[in-house]
Amino acid sequence: MKKSAADVWEDLRNQVDFLAEADGGFVFRRPEDAAPPAPAASPASAGLPPLSGCPPQTAAERKALEEIDDQVRVCKLCVLHKFRTRAVPGEGNRSAELMFIGEGPGRDEDAQGRPFVGRAGQLLRRIIAAMTFREDEVYITNMVKCRPPDNRVPHHEEIETCSPYLVRQIELIRPRVIVILGKTPTDYFAPGREGMTARRGRFGDYRGIPVMPTFHPSYLVRNEGNRELKRMVWEDMQKVMALLGRK
């Protein structure tokens, strides 16, 4: 559906607001005025189906997603359930074309039962708005659904125990692109020996779905004066936007 002039203006305003809030760290121009990367340049995009080619989600699939949420909220399969206030299944559009996956809930998320609601979450939601998406158009979740004590990195066995919930969410939502935030989900979906700086910005593939690794918003918050990090994340998101036809 073609956007109205008011919608286009709102998208531009969201981008400008986000860039201003990020202390000017994100830029619209690429170095040396390079052209945006064409979707065809990514091997992962070659088999990307058009939006019209995605089968509609069935009532049974919608019900299955609701059942996953219910199962997550009472899950006791790993030790993390002993430390939680609320489990955090995820939230957003259950048939989203764009999915964001982080590491695990933090203190604010554990208290509210919602993903990405603290400072890092506020930054992620500004990024989403700058990408010309509304929050109700995307789906946001984490590798593990319960908060690790002291916000530590989830252990391998905790990720493996919790991953069937996430895998099933991906199967039912059928996103066209997944953005993985930080090292933990990158190690799971795009494993490699290189660090995040080398792995970010390059599309990987998960069961035919293009996967874009980038820095976790909490890393940007901890390094808020580093404009280069912000620029790199914005470049990564521009590649995702180009792949999805969002200019």
Image: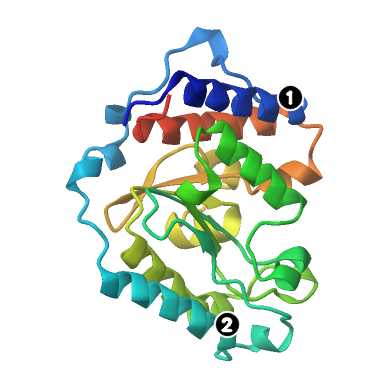
Q: Is residue 23 left or right of residue 184?
A: right
Q: Quadrant of the N terminus?
A: top left
Classify mark 2: residues with Cα within 10 Å, few (<14), some (14-19) or many (20+).
some
**Mark number displayed over residue 211:** none
For label 2, the residue is: 73
Q: Is residue 49 visible?
A: no
Q: Is residue 196 visible?
A: yes
Dividing the picture into quarters, in which one does residue 25 lie? Answer: top right
Q: Which residue extends farthest top?
A: 32
* Above or below, comparing residue 204 to residue 159 in the picture: above
Q: How many marks?
A: 2
Q: Is residue 117 left or right of residue 101?
A: right
Q: Looking at the image, do the residues carrying marks 2 and 1 touch, with CB atoms under 8 Å apart?
A: no
In the rendering, at what x and y percent does residue 210 appear?
35, 46
Q: Secondary structure at mark 1?
A: helix
Distance CA(mark 2)–CA(mark 1):
38 Å
In the rendering, at what x and y percent does residue 217 appear?
67, 46
In the rendering, at what x and y percent does residue 118 appear?
75, 55
* Above or below, comparing residue 232 to residue 117 in the picture: above
Q: Amino acid at mark 1?
A: Ala
User: Which numbered disc flags the more N-terminal residue, 2 or 1?
Assistant: 1
Q: Secondary structure at mark 2?
A: helix
In front of the other: 247 or 210: 247
In the rendering, at what x and y percent does residue 220 appear?
72, 42
Classify mark 1: residues with Cα within 10 Å, few (<14), some (14-19) or many (20+).
few
What residue lies at 48% left-to-right and 22% top-to-bottom? 8
What residue lies at 27% left-to-right and 75% top-to-bottom? 60
For label 1, the residue is: 20
